[in-house]
Amino acid sequence: MAVNFFQYRLEDLTDYIQSFGEKKFRAQQLYRWVYGLKEFDFNNMTNISKNFRAQLPQLLNLELPQVVKEQISRDGTRKYLFDVGDNQTVEAVLIPGNNGRRTLCLSSEVGCNMACKFCFTGKQKLKKRLSTQQIVGQFVRVMMDQPEGEPITNVVFMGMGEPLDNPEAVFSASKILHSSWGINLSRKKITVSTSGLVPQIPLVTQAGLRLAVSLNASNDETREKIMPINKKWPIADLLEACRIHSRTSKDKVTMEYVLLKDFNDSLEHARELVKILRNVPSKVNLIPFNEHPDSGFHRPTEEKVNAFQTYLMSKDVHVLRRRTMGRDIYAACGQLTSAHKNHPITMSI
Ligand code: SF4
């Protein structure tokens, strides 16, 4: 029976192809046709021998996860809802940026066990870890949708799920996206965002990918209230792992900080944040909370956000305020869910 092409890293596909007595370079050719040239019909792969082309449908299938729903925001953000089997769905979001940047936010799990209090996904317990082919499939399906000359330029594992809770599939998928025979996305254009699974952080370093950390607090007491994982790996351990990553990779770590009204948005918190990040090569990404039903949290006022940002800047912290994209379609950070029926739909094209 034909197996799914998108599960295979190049070396695995090579082994598979060779097991049928074919030459090693056939795997490279297949990668080039499918990922590079978006050709899904084996018959059109003209540099592959006729005999092998005829055999390929029995060996490989090119099935992608089905898109159940697609929404386009007023700002151009696109949200895709994918069927990943067992009556489960996940979301991926394509976010347009400046200078031709197009970032695809991928999901790695259905639901999530980390239970961060501000996150919509965290309200659903983990139901399923996605396979490599389901992660790569999200990318390829969105890639096929892109007009000529408008490639996806960046990937972030910031969708549903904790990527380091599903490391095998996430790092295999990253390797596939990175292969120079296929999509050829630079490792530095792939970011893994973790809530703080400290023992797994070296895997990001080894894979040569960028690291982002969902920090969201300046002390353990505050962080524990919104991120249960902090009880297991407190801030000091997390920042030490970030320091080691940064030293080895020579990259800054992105510290995501969701600003929650009257919870972590005071100048006292900003002062504390400056202190704890003093020896961690990093930049801070401020994300004013995107409100969603029943979260119990609110978005701080613009003045509060500006004051927080200004304070960090005055202390020479590299700080960016993330533009909130796709709010009208609930595609913003922390709003993704497989329970899409709970989402009010305000679609606009
Ligand atoms: S923020 Fe990330 S790690 Fe936390 S519950 Fe949501 S998906 Fe899971």
Image (spheres, rainbow, N blue to C red):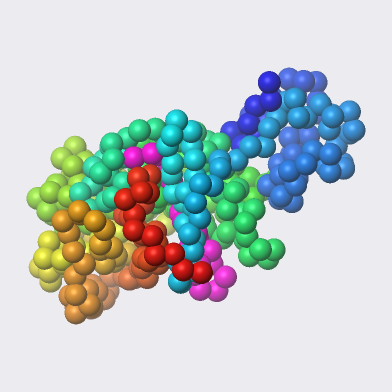
Work out which quarter of the rendered image holds the N terminus and state it: top right
Please state if 40 lies on the left or on the right of 91 as rendered. right
- Magenta span includes 95: yes
Query: From where the camera sits, is residue 40 visible?
Result: yes
The picture quadrant where one finds residue 113 is top left
Residue 83 drawn in magenta: no
Residue 114 locus on image (x, y percent): 26, 40
Q: Residue 154 placed where, x, y %?
A: 52, 58
Q: From the top left corner, tell me how far across and down residue 303 is, in percent.
A: 19, 79
Residue farthest along the right direction in this orientation = 50
In the image, taking residue 224 as reference, residue 70 lies left or right, namely right
Q: Nearer the viewer, residue 84 or 323?
A: 84
252 or 319, nearer to the observer: 319
**Residue at horizontal 83%, vertical 42%?**
45
Residue range in magenta is 93-111
Give the residue at x 65% y 27%.
3
Q: Position of residue 109 (x, y in %)?
A: 40, 39
Counting labels gives 0
Residue located 31% across and 46% down the image? 121
What residue is rendered at 79% in x and 38% in y? 42
Residue 315 vertical position relative to residue 294 in the rendered view, above or below: below
Task: Inspect this view and state whether residue 193 appears.
Answer: no
